[in-house]
């Protein structure tokens, strides 16, 4: 059930560059078995997915639930076709919702993914 896209889209690069311009440390293409995610932000223990044509809402919802239950991750989605319009609002919303519990959630996750 693991999916890996080898080519990074322009939308994906736009999100990465936006995060880097704003001083956000991230790790790209991180594996949380059995899934690989687009961007992982350790400080907030969140995943940011850039939703291109390969994404399907029902499959993404199941994956997001699994990542939350198995790794205590919060997952944010940015539509590939609207990166410039929504990246700021979506990232700020995600980071605000994650900030208070990030440290505890990340520590619990480290037991399952020690090299994180």
Image (cartoon, rainbow, N blue to C red):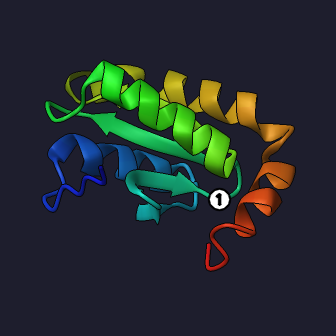
- State how many labels appear: 1
Residue at horizontal 46 percent and vertical 61 percent from the top: 33
* Left or right: where 37 falls relative to 64: left
* Viewer-nearest residue: 93 or 77: 77
Please report the residue visible at 37 percent of the width from the left and 30 percent of the height from the top.
60
Check the image and name the residue furthest to the bottom: 115
**Residue 95 rendering spot, x and y as whole percentages:** 67, 36
Q: Quadrant of the C terminus?
A: bottom right
Q: Using residue 82 as the reference point, say whether residue 26 is left or right of it.
A: right
Above or below, 50 against 2 in this view is above
| Residue 67: x %, y % from top left | 55, 44
Is residue 82 depicted above or below 91 in this figure? Answer: above
Tell which of 75 and 9 is nearer to you.
Answer: 75
Which quadrant of the structure image shows residue 111?
A: bottom right
Rendering coords of residue 107 (x, y %): 81, 62
Identify the residue at image location x=67%, y=67%: 112
Question: Mark 1 Cα within 10 Å, few/some/many (few <14, many 20+)?
Answer: some
Residue 75 seen from this side: no
Residue drawn at x 16%, y 48% is 9
Of the pair 53 and 86, the residue shown nearer to us = 53
Task: Specify whether 26 is left or right of 29.
Answer: right
* Residue labelled with disc 1: 42
Relative height, residue 56 to residue 116 (above, below):
above
Residue at the front extreme of this rendering:
1
| Observer able to see residue 105 | yes
């Amino acid at each position: 059930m693991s999916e890996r896209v080898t080519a990074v889209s322009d939308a994906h690069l736009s999100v990465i560059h936006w995060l880097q311009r704003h001083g956000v440390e991230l790790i790209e293409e991180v594996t949380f078995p059995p899934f690989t995610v687009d961007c992982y932000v350790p400080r907030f223990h969140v995943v940011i997915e850039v939703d291109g044509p390969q994404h399907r809402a029902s499959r993404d919802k199941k994956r997001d639930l699994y990542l939350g239950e198995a790794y205590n991750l919060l997952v944010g989605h940015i539509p590939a076709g609207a990166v410039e319009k929504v990246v700021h609002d979506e990232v700020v919303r995600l980071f605000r919702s994650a900030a208070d519990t990030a440290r505890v959630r990340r520590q619990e996750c480290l037991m399952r993914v020690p090299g994180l």
